Amino acid sequence: MKRAFYTTVSALALLTAAPAIAGDNTSAVTQSGTNATATVNQGGSNSASTVTQGGDLNTTTIDQNGTQTGGSSTVSQTGNSNNALVTQADDASGANPSDVSNIDQGGSNNSATVTQTGGTTPPGTYWANQSAITQSGDSNDAMVTQVDDTQHSTITQSSNGNSATVDQGDSSKAATDESWGNTSTILQEGGDGNIANVSQKSLLNTSNVHQNGTANEANVSQDADGYATGGTSNVDQSGSDNVGNVTQYGAVNSSSVTQSTVGNVANVSQTGDNDSSDVNQSAGYSATFGYYSPGDTSGLADITQVGNNNSSSVSQSGLMNVADVDQLADDNVSTITQTGEGAYARVLQSGSGNTSNVDQSGTGDNFSLNYQIQQTGDYNASDLNQSGSWDSANVLQSGNGNTSGIAQSGDNDYASLIQSGSGNSSSITQGGSYNNAFVTQSSDGNGSTVDQSGSFNNAYVTQGPAGL
């Protein structure tokens, strides 16, 4: 049974004698500069510490008192006013080393804190907890906390004023081996003031955060019950003022968020198993709405999936588009593509096995490419395409096995399609102006086709209640 407890790892070298179990520790400290302080205190066993400080006013503190199996810590600081703090411990049941920490700070006023508490590990360095921090910019802050086994964290910050926080493992799950094998990689470069927070509390999760712009924020949380494993999150932000929030609770979920311009917001929540989501936001300059100003929202994508085996994809290349997807059952698929500007898409699928496809390509001075797809039955399919102005479409399919298609390319069009029976098929195509089409099919096995290509057309189709 494992014993997990928290420690703090910081780079500062000092050597002090320890309890009776202490022994076979090695420490090497090299300081070339003014007012540098290194404190290494190794009261455990089989630990190795190396501290090299080449600048002024550097501070390194290494405490490996709890390392009974053995820890390895290397700190190299070349710059002014840097700070590194490392604390490592283990439960004496694994192989040497159980914790490995490497910190390299080449800029000024950087701060790094590492806390690693290892548990039972098989032979080999791979199975140890590993933390690597490299900061070559100024005023960056990095904090890593890792509990249990085989946690791997890599943080690289080469610009200025960035913040990175990684928390992997759960002390309450360590005894039952339910929180090991997580991997986190954070790369912040090219711009200043980025924030990345990663929390992984279950088994074998992987998180990758890459921020190459300025003032971006990425928040990733992955957790599960019991032995549920294998969540994957990728956040890539190359613009500025973007926000990506990913929460995954379950097994084998996958999320990808790519934001390449400015002012986009992506929120992803997946609480089932085997869910996948893909968000791509690339809006920039708008011929209609002008340039982006700080505080504006170029694009908003919100995905919530609480069932199993759901898939959602949102692609936004226009400005000020909004996509909202809720999939609350199993085996649903939703695809939204917005290449126009000022569009709104809302998809709600609370049944199972439904498929929804939305394509909005209109541009101009309208915010009326608005529609909602709601599918509360099972195995329904809906396809909507809007490329004109003043278009609005509402689709509600509450039966089973229904199919619907709406394509609107004219002006001032409105289409509403409601199918509350099962096995119905409906198609609406409007190519002119001032068109209205309403189709309601409340019985089973009906078929309806509406095609309007002229102006001032109205079409209403109602096909009888169920049971008649």
Image (tube, rainbow, N blue to C red):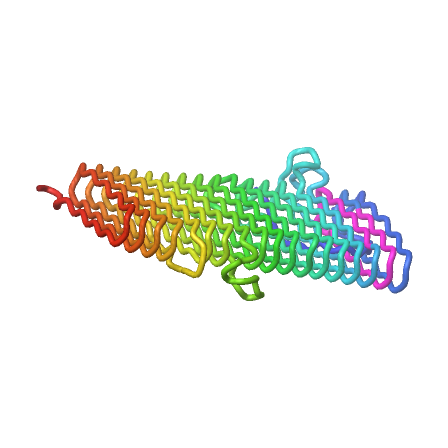
In this figure, what is the number of numbered marks? 0
Residue 87 visible to the viewer = no
Q: Quick one: quadrant of the N terminus?
A: top right
Is 182 colored magenta in this rendering?
no
> Quarter of the image holding residue 85?
bottom right
Magenta stretch, overall SS? strand
- The picture quadrant where one finds residue 216 is bottom right
Instruction: Judge left or right: residue 141 versus residue 377.
Output: right
Residue nearer the viewer, 357 or 377: 357
Q: Is residue 276 visible?
A: yes
Looking at the image, which is closer to me, 328 or 324? 324
Which image quarter is the C terminus in? Answer: top left
Q: What stretch is highlighted in magenta?
A: 49-77
- Residue in the picture at 51% in, 50% down: 317
The residue positioned farthest toward the left in the image shown: 468
Q: Is residue 289 left or right of residue 454?
A: right
Name of the residue lying farthest toward the front: 454
Q: Position of residue 435 (x, y in %)?
A: 27, 53
Q: Is residue 189 left or right of residue 333?
A: right
Task: Please name whichever residue, 91 or 105, is drawn nearer the observer in this view of the structure.
Answer: 105
For image coordinates 70% across by 50% down, the residue present is 156
Vertical arrangement, residue 235 with respect to residue 367, above or below: above
- Residue 74 location, x and y as percent? 78, 48
Q: In this view, does 245 lie to the left or right of 403?
A: right
Outermost residue toward the top? Answer: 123
Measuring from the top left, give residue 7's x and y in whole percent: 67, 54
Is 63 included in the stretch rendered in magenta? yes
Image location of residue 466, percent across then percent down:
13, 43
